[in-house]
Image: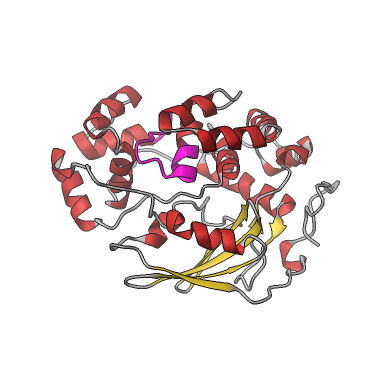
Amino acid sequence: MSAVTTGRIPRRPPRSPERDPRPDTGRPIEAEYRPGEPIDALRAVRHQQHGAHDPTMTSSGDVLWRVSRTPEGIATLALRARRDRVLAAAWGPGARWALDQLPRLCGSGDDPAGFDDARHPLIAEIHRRHRDLRLGATDLVFDDLASAIFEQKVTGLQAFGAWRAIVTWYGERAPGPTPKPLFAPPAHWQLIPSWAWHRAGLEPPQSRTVVASARRRASIERALAAARDGDERERILTSLPGVGPWTSAETRIRAFGDPDAVSVGDYHLSHTVGYALTGHRVDDDGMLELLEPWRGHRQRVIRLIYAGGVFEPRRGPRLHPEDHRDR
């Protein structure tokens, strides 16, 4: 039995996932996606992963496994990339939806036309080596919003650990022959008790924001679906209590593949962009000034910088996350 099947939340986290019975796998639905041009489809999909131990995604050999809660139910995808196509198999009630959405997940909605890489020699060189880079979109607004809220003002280690705990405890076991137990995000975020958030290591401001947003989930999803562009989505998202520009940008990047979104307020991003483009750190204002010539494609520039592996050398110890939970 999965952790959440009827909307009732257990009084304590469920048993170890290794002992959680595997759902009936059944026969998968299979499909093949052939992009019209070479794209790095699996890179686009992997960008949606929340840390190395994300319970919604894993790799096994040349297969990338991803679990999501679609509008039609849970779906497990198994993806293999070939030179000119992506082979996909899907299980679960949301399998058909996931396969229909697969091209956008792989980056088909991302159009690099008009991107001028000649404005900077480093960007031109990285773009030459990564012409196939695309920004994928999940079209699953709320779960992407929730995952971004988890990552507010904490280290990645803390955020990914809390995500792993909550999804494993209160999500639903993924259908299909996954190489290890995987889970879809919870159906009822607002029903998760306060002590569970604390035990998972998520700070109260973040957990309150997730719960408050979950109570407005339907209206948020309707408003964002009707939004005309990134600016309108920005206004909708930042109107939510506890959601600022950073969370809005991260949500738009993940859910819509927004090629212009910039996560202002990120602890490392401005330093990375500044170092790549000028050789030294800049603050958020300096980063926005440097990226302005590429307006419309600013997220693309950021992704190219990361794809090129251009990072400022570390000069000090890593930030040690604080943990205020009772042991």
- Residue 114 at x, y percent in the picture: 22, 42
Residue 258, magenta (yes or no):
yes
Query: Residue placed at 42% from the left, 33% from the top?
Result: 230
Residue 199, image quadrant:
top right
Q: Is residue 312 visible?
A: no
Q: Nearer the viewer, residue 285 or 67?
A: 67
Query: Residue placed at 39% from the left, 54% from the top?
Result: 107
Quadrant in which the C terminus appears: top right
- Residue 299 at x, y percent in the picture: 34, 40
Query: Residue placed at 49% from the left, 44% from the top?
Result: 255
Query: Residue placed at 66% from the left, 40% from the top?
Result: 201
> Please, what is the dominant secondary structure of the magenta stretch?
loop
- Residue 122 at x, y percent in the picture: 17, 45
Query: Relative to 81, does residue 11 appear above or below in the rendering?
Result: above
Q: Nearer the viewer, residue 323 or 91?
A: 91
Query: Relative to 32, does residue 164 appear above or below in the rendering?
Result: above
Q: Is residue 152 visible?
A: yes
**Which residues are the magenta region?**
250-268
